[in-house]
Image (cartoon, rainbow, N blue to C red):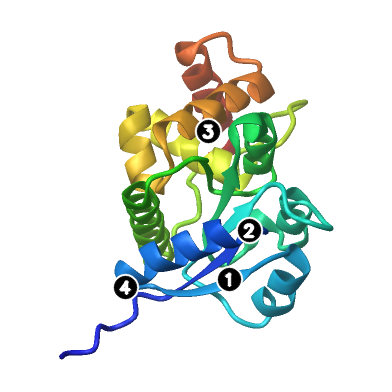
Amino acid sequence: MVEQTSRGEIFVVDDDPAVRDTLSMVLKAAGYEVICFADGAALLSVARSRTPAAVLLDVNIPGKSGLDILKELHGEDYPAPIFMISGQGDIAMAVGAIKSGALDFIEKPFRGSEIVGRLDEAIGAYARRQSENASPKFGSLHFPGREPLTRREREVLEQFAAGASNKEAGRTLGISPRTIEDHRANIMKKLGARNAADLIRIVMTAAQRAS
């Protein structure tokens, strides 16, 4: 029997043993190594010294919440995509987590094939951006009097300005179309855009000032 090459480590943080066991089984079957944690403190002690391929972090865990842990890891700058796992009542909290740097969120109950597909896409997109050494084209733009965009928002804005649909942008960035839409709504709110055409006008004006 030929031993399967590992596709990388996935860190799973959930206080429910059944969820940890299910995720571990599904992800191992897909070729990943899995390290499970029952709380955020245990994750932090490991995540600061070794980098996984991705992190699955439950919103509601004992002690510090998943959102607290995300902030301590500096989610947007952490060198691996972080997914928040959320129950039916946690969606607003999960969306808040995306604003704090989580890549995306996965709702419970979930299907194993969905988890693997989302992780494969996100890890692949992350690796492509790293190999291209891509910093967002709009990273240096200054929007006077406006709240600055996060790096993820700048990446989404770049896709939008290039004419990509939510689905296309999501595929490029490894994010669900629904989350892309959340980012777009937040970008428009921050930049004071009334509609899509207005947003493009604001971006193009800022680009002309920067050139």
Q: CA distance from mark 3 to mark 1?
A: 45 Å
Q: Nearer the viewer, mark 3 or mark 1?
A: 1
Q: Earlier in the sequence, mark 4 or mark 1?
A: 4
Q: Quadrant of residue 14?
A: bottom right
Instruction: Compare marks 2 and 4 and give the one earlier in the sequence.
Output: 2
Q: Residue at x 33, y 43 (%)?
A: 171
The residue drawn where x is 67% and y is 79% is: 46
Label disc, if present, on residue 14 of the rendered structure: 2
Asked if the residue under mark 2 is in contact with the one under mark 1, i.e. CB atoms within 8 Å, the reply is: yes
Packing grade of label 1 (10 A; few <14, some 14-19, many >=20) is some
Vertical comparison of 209 with 51: above or below: above
Circle 3 sits in a helix, a strand or a loop, which is it? helix
* CA separation in Å, label 2 and label 4: 21 Å
- Amino acid bearing label 4: Gly
What percent of the width, then of the height, locates residue 200? 47, 21
Query: Dot 1 corresponds to which residue?
Result: 36
Could one spot residue 138 in this view of the protein? Answer: no
- Residue at (17%, 90%) from the top-left corner? 2
Whichever of labels 3 and 1 marks the residue nearer the N terminus, that label is 1
Marking on residue 207: 3
Q: Relative to 175, is 21 above or below? A: below
At numbered mark 4, what does the secondary structure look like: helix, strand or loop?
loop
Residue linked to disc 4: 31
Task: Please tell me how many numbered marks the rendered image carries.
Answer: 4
Secondary structure under the numbered disc 1 in the rendered image = strand
Residue kind at label 3, given as amino acid type? Ala
Confirm or deny contact between disc 4 and disc 3 (CB under 8 A).
Answer: no
Q: State how far apart marks 4 and 3 are (Cα).
A: 44 Å
Q: CA distance from mark 2 to mark 3?
A: 44 Å
Residue ranking furthest to the top: 194
Q: Residues within 10 Å of mark 4 (few under 14, many from 20)?
A: some
Q: Is residue 110 left or right of residue 163?
A: right
